[in-house]
Amino acid sequence: MTRTTRHDADLLVIGGGAAGLTAAVGASRLGARVVLAEREAALGGDCLHHGCVPSKTLLATARVRHAMRRAAFFGLPAPELEPVDFTAVARRIREVQAVIQLHDAPERFASLGVDVRFGPARFCDEHTVDIGGRRVSAARILVATGSAPQLPPLPGLDSVPFLTNREVFSQDTLPASLLVLGGGPMACEMAQAFARLGSRVTMVLRGPRILPRDDADMAGVVHAALATDGVRVLAGATVTMLRQWRDADGEGVEADLEAPLGEGRGPLTVRAHRLLAALGRTPETAGLDLAAAGVATGKHGGIVVDGRMRTSQGHIFAAGDVTGDWQFTHAAGHEAGVVVANAVLRLPRKADYTRMPWCTFTDPELASVGCNERMAAERGLPVDVHVEPFSANDRALAEGAPEGRLKLVLRKGGGKVLGVQAVGPHAGEVLNEWVAVLGGGVRLSALAGAVHPYPTLGEISARAAGNVVSRVLFSGGVRRVLRLLFGYRG
């Protein structure tokens, strides 16, 4: 009879962000002995300290400022607005973080049976990890160390001061001008937020348009909103040099650009007081010494996993941004559940990204779930598209936000919904109903027949479903049958 190896823990979790915390609690509640290692001074990960929470708090502040400027549109006296004190804005961000931090307090996780330890983690071998100088062995290990700002080798970037998501929310003053490198969700959100707070904002992106994951027509609505807020978008631009400048107006960074779209064919120089690098994320594996454990990484540095979130070592798992794929907090939570099922319950559950939603929290928001037109074209899927405008929604009109649309991507001929996109007011909330519809296999006729309270933004979903269903219900064939049965003469 083979003797079972005794380990300090049944599951060792490296990383106290969304994936790590979810897995630690789930495993502990199922009776596993769990050790959680976090290298930072507090739990919560990038989402709480440098990502989702501070960015959405900043966006809410900017939205209020924008609404104050639009007072006359709603029939109110236009207020005299003082310049924004960014220290007060940053203070509110910290206050919101402090409230949420209570939920992620070490004491709470200790009360749930999780042994929380702070310090950098480094693999000694495939079952042993050094945590701040103390070794811990575990039967199974989860790496959930998240991601860091991606900093490509742009000429001069290493010699100029710049901000990333780790510094942008804690500035002492609102920059008079801001240069944003990137065209993804964070770049768009921060560009709009700072423009609404009073900064002159220029976005520089390598690709031909913002938000390349989304369909061009939907991203175009966001682009138009950014332009309305005064954001200058320079697409298709190559940064040839970054350097510092100083004069009587202050100091900052200027960028030499090569042939941005719509700006002529020659070079262009853009100057700003602050530079924000929002060029994506890269998996955070520095210092882990994955090679000591025999854990393989891919060409972009992410830990390679299979559908069950297992690495090249079957007892070592990875979840969240460190895998380099779906870098969303809700995706990390989903993957953590898959890890718990496999590592603790020993059930062969696989991650399912078929209906993974995502949302860019600009104003208007842009949210998607499932397959969009771009994805369908890449996969060679023939589709039908139905578009419902928010301008036909009474609540959107009352809110003064008629811009945008809801788009259904349907399998051609069959009518099955492959994906849904929404760009408009609170699009992320509108999309939640479609996440349930697609995940639960709800028929469009059921959604069309469901009574929605009036007036709500969610009515646009029932209206869109109803209009698709009505193509069959009010077809010539149905009318002919009714005429034959009941003698209708219309």
Image: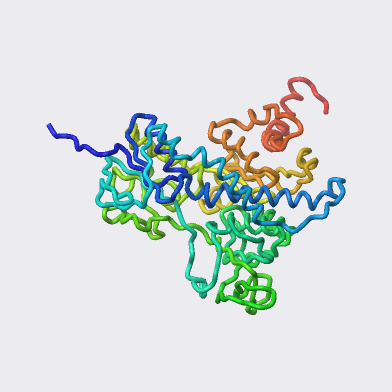
Quadrant (top left/top right/bottom left/bottom right) for the C terminus: top right
Q: Nearer the viewer, residue 125 or 183?
A: 125
Q: Nearer the viewer, residue 311 or 480?
A: 311
Q: Quadrant of the N terminus?
A: top left
Given the current orientation, which residue lies at the most extreme left position? 1
Residue at image location 34% in from the left, 29% down from the top: 31
Report x, y in % for residue 403: 74, 49
The residue under the point 70% across, 59% down is 195
Q: Is residue 386 in sight in this rendering? A: no
The image position of residue 51, as x and y in percent, is 54, 51
Which residue is nearer to you in this view: 349 or 38?
Answer: 38
The chosen color scheme is: rainbow
Q: Position of residue 63 (x, y in %)?
A: 71, 49
* Image point (60%, 31%), residue name: 443
Q: Residue 129 or 281: which is nearer the viewer?
A: 129
Residue 49 visible here = yes
Counting the numbered discs, the total is 0
Expressed as whole percent of the image width and height from the top left, the position of residue 81 reads 79, 55
Q: Is residue 3 left or right of residue 131?
A: left
Q: Is residue 286 left or right of residue 258?
A: left
Residue at image x 77%, y 38%?
A: 395
